[in-house]
Amino acid sequence: MTEKRSILLKYGELILKGDNKSYFDAQLLRQIRKKLKPLGEFRVFTSQSTVFVESEDDGALEAALPVLQRVFGIVSLSIAWRVEKNMDAILEAVEKKIAPQLVGARSFKADARRSDKKFPLKSPEIAREVGARVLSTLGGRAPKVDVHHPQETCWVEIREDFAYVHAKKLPGAGGMPYGTGGRCLLMLSGGIDSPVAGWRMAKRGAFVDALHFESFPYTSERAKEKVMDLARKLCAYTETMNFASIRMTDIQLRMQEVCREELFTILLRRSMMRLACRVARRQACGAIVTGESLGQVASQTMAALATTDAVADLPVFRPLIGMDKEEIVATSRAIDCFETSILPFEDCCTVFTPRHPKLNPTMEEVLEEEAKLPMAELEDEAFRAIEFVRIDK
Ligand code: ATP
Ligand code: MG
């Protein structure tokens, strides 16, 4: 049997539509090639809404699977057997390679697609023969045939040069190819929420840069390392990441001297937002992203969010605003951030947390407190001392 394996990647409906298709295609292929580069030599090409990944090295192909499962823009993946374009070869692969994969399934159907219309059999005829071969191979162990809602589908695709036969589908990361949705600046803390927020934006195709605020020496170097570790975790889905950090210590100490304690968090958040917008503009980011979720803490009531929004001169995206903590935690685990997020390190927001934060601050009182400090000057100083690191996976 002269067959080889290939990985077939299916991409979402959305990408197929509109004039942007070739742009999306190009971005997706660029991502795939970039992610596969460290793993060896691959042939990557696209044909009729399927991306083909092939390698002479079967081990490299195995290693590529989990990496490809993290590439946004791919809905599902399967390992296909690539065989010569004749029914004998196809049916042999079905018998030897595919049928065993179907043992234990509740139901199945066979389906076929022909992009080469010169192939002597039409798609339904191919499917019929393939289905029959599965049944005859497995006998009593064969799943029952269900053409409407099969648990598994045995696919045959007749392409230009080869036929591809595959069954088990693995889930892809979904979303849009990374980098097709503009650039945003993620306010990244060491908590559970903000990495999930960044991942959600990356999934929708946005380039993600990160900005972290620290309060050294009240927050430690190790706390900052933890945040960089989280940025690194996100890079498994994205690419390298521009990571900026700004020290808020002076601003916080000055606030502590003169401002009402119950408003510390709100005042700090407004200051962070103003600085974030400055960083975003400098890095050509079109939006700010935070991990806020309505009502989760005092600074995330509607009134509190309104006071932070008021100082932003870019759109502020809060992809988690309507999510429960459990839902956020589930995603955090799924993207392998949770264990890092829960490491016990201090955050600049928690170091100076008021004992009784105000839940419904009015704009007047916030402005009144803010006016007690030369904010513009203090923020200029903090902005000048910004540090940049490039994070890689
Ligand atoms: P997280 O789990 O993301 O830390 P949180 O529930 O602890 O969120 P807050 O501390 O109120 O909530 O922070 C809300 C959002 O503000 C965070 O999701 C993040 O986007 C941003 N943020 C908070 N602290 C920092 C920080 N030190 N540096 C950068 N952004 C921060
Ligand atoms: Mg936090």
Image: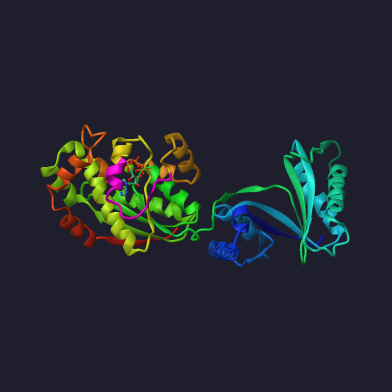
Q: Where is residue 55 in the image (x, y as percent from the top left)?
A: 66, 64
Residue at image location 22% in from the left, 44% down from the top: 267
Question: Which residue sits at x=60%, y=65%?
Answer: 22
Residue 358: name its quadrant: top left
The image shows residue 156 at horizontal and vertical percentages of 78, 54
Q: Quadrant of the C terminus?
A: bottom left
Examine the structure image and report whether residue 333 is included in the region drawn in magenta.
Answer: no
* Res. 221 visible in picture: no
Question: Where is residue 45, by image quadrant?
Answer: bottom right
Q: Residue 151's x, y, as percent? A: 72, 39
Instruction: Depth check: give the residue in front, 9 or 98.
Output: 9
**Image coords of residue 172 (percent x, y):** 59, 50
Q: In this view, does 185 lie to the left or right of 331?
A: left
Q: Does the magenta stretch include residue 316?
A: yes
Q: What stretch is highlighted in magenta?
A: 305-319
Question: Looking at the image, which residue sits at the far top?
Answer: 356
